[in-house]
Image (spheres, rainbow, N blue to C red):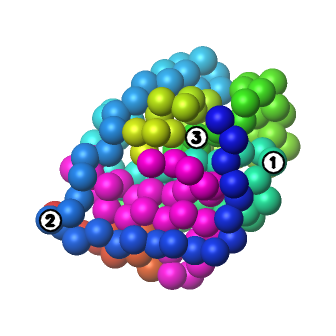
Amino acid sequence: MRFRTIFLCFATLLTAADHAPAPDFSLPGANGAPVKLSRYQGKVVLLDFWATWCHGCKTEIPWYMEFSQAYKKDGLVVIGVSMDDEGWKVVRPFIKEKKMRYPVVIGNDELGKRYGLDEMPLTLLIDRHGNIAYRHSGVVDKDAFEGELRNLLASTH
């Protein structure tokens, strides 16, 4: 499956009534251990669909690494979903080069369809109840996105 990289931003902050459950998945991570989304219920999850060839993705990944470190104690978990057709062959070296310290899985067409992925990067914030609270296609505005993230981390609903 081929995706376009977009630099225009299309963000949707969903009202609590519009929060739809995030489709669960269990896929092997870089170390072979399964990464299961539902395991992180009770945490806020930043779910990032990306690829090694996506320039916008390469811009965002360092930001998400910062967020992962800064907000881990507040309940944030970052999960990267690589949509590289070449799989681990290109993703493992990329993870090592960028020193990515959060879980990364290799996505597939079915998972992409379940999340409505048609352009990358695609970033979602999933609330503590496992519902999609925020959906962003394209490169995020770092400061605005961090504000949404902080609001979601502070929310108990």
Magenta residues span 116-145
Give coordinates of residue 14: x percent, y percent.
Answer: 29, 69
Give coordinates of residue 103: x percent, y percent.
Answer: 57, 38
In the depicted view, which residue is nearer to us: 7 or 89? 7
Give the CA separation, mark 3 to mark 1.
14 Å
Locate the N terminus by quadrant. top right
Identify residue for label 2: 17
Does dot 1 land on a helix, a strand or a loop?
Answer: loop
Residue type at mark 1 is Trp
Q: Is residue 135 magenta?
A: yes
Residue type at mark 2 is Ala
Locate the C terminus by quadrant. bottom left
Task: Return the mark for residue 81.
Answer: 3
Does dot 3 land on a helix, a strand or a loop?
Answer: strand
Disc on the earlier residue, 2 or 3? 2
Give coordinates of residue 133: x percent, y percent.
Answer: 31, 62
Give coordinates of residue 95: x percent, y percent.
Answer: 75, 39
Identify residue for label 1: 53
Task: Return the mark for residue 123.
Answer: none
